[in-house]
Image (spheres, rainbow, N blue to C red):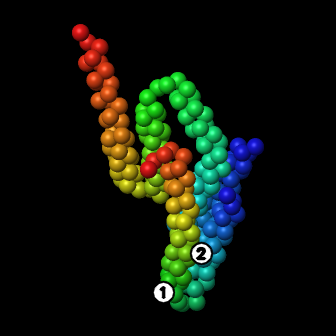
Amino acid sequence: MNIDLIFKIASIGILLGILHIVLDKAGKEEFAHIVNLVGVIIVFTVVIGLISKLFNSIKTIFQLY
Amino acid sequence: MEILQIVGVGIVATVLIVLLRQSNRSEYALLVSLVTGIIIFTLILNKLKYVVEVLNQLVRSTGVEFAYFTTILKIIGIAYIVEFGAQISRDAGENAIASKIELGGKVIMMVLALPILLALMDLVVKILP
């Protein structure tokens, strides 16, 4: 399993946090919120793919059909 | 050794989560803890599969009714998934959702365990004079 996924998600979170602050200071609050929303959506789709893979593997192991 | 990997991933993820929470990005902290849980589970996946296979052979060799064992396996799987989901939502501070998930899990486990209970009742009735 790719352990570097944890670092990717954490780095995306931190970078978007900084971007949020920069955009706030630049006076574009609504744009900052949109960027934050898009970031969360992208990371969440990746995580949902992982969750579905986890549930499939659990189904096969425990014969939970 | 898998255990070193598991502990290493856990500690690194915890540090990252604290960092994310400190810069008030708690949605990413939740996502990182979710991904860490999944990664740790996939690390132990093969070991778990091996244990389940050995148990399968054991039950098959003793001639016990095999349906009971598959039910036990299902209940263990459900227990793990319920605990996984409830703990994630409890970490995020949503205790209400966590208890709802656990309630659903308990009901499903009860439904699965009923056939065994009925079989036990029949057995007891047969034994009594």
Residue extending farthest right = B1
Task: State the image coordinates of residue B35 (x, y, percent, origin top left).
Answer: 59, 59
Q: Could you classify mark 2 by the number of other residues whose Cα lies within 10 Å: few (under 14), some (14-19), or many (20 or more)?
A: some
Give the chain letter at badge 2: A
Decide: marks 1, 2 in contact (CB < 8 A)?
no
Task: State the image coordinates of residue B99 (x, y, percent, origin top left).
Answer: 37, 48
Q: Quadrant of the C terminus of chain B?
A: top left
Task: State the image coordinates of residue A6 (x, y, percent, origin top left).
Answer: 65, 62
Q: Residue at x 37, y 55 (%)?
A: B97
Q: Quadrant of residue A2?
A: bottom right
Residue sitting nearer the eye, B73 or B22: B73
The mark found on residue A56 in the picture is none
Q: Is residue A54 visible?
A: yes
- Whether residue B4 sits left or right of residue B49 in the image: it is right
- Whether residue B63 sits left or right of residue B53 in the image: it is left
Residue sitting nearer the eye, B120 or A14: B120
Q: Secondary structure at mark 2?
A: helix
Residue B102, compared with residue A30, is above or below; it is above
Distance in Å between CA atoms under marks 1 and 2: 14 Å
Q: Label 2 sits on what residue type?
A: Gly
Q: Residue at x 46, y 32 (%)?
A: B66
Residue extending farthest bottom = A27
Residue bearing mark 1: A30
Residue extending farthest top = B129
Residue bearing mark 2: A17
Q: Secondary structure at mark 1?
A: helix
Q: Residue at x 54, y 82 (%)?
A: A35
Residue sitting nearer the eye, B55 or A14: B55
Q: Label 1 sits on what residue type?
A: Glu
Give the chain letter at badge 1: A
Q: Could you classify mark 1 by the number of other residues whose Cα lies within 10 Å: few (under 14), some (14-19), or many (20 or more)?
A: few
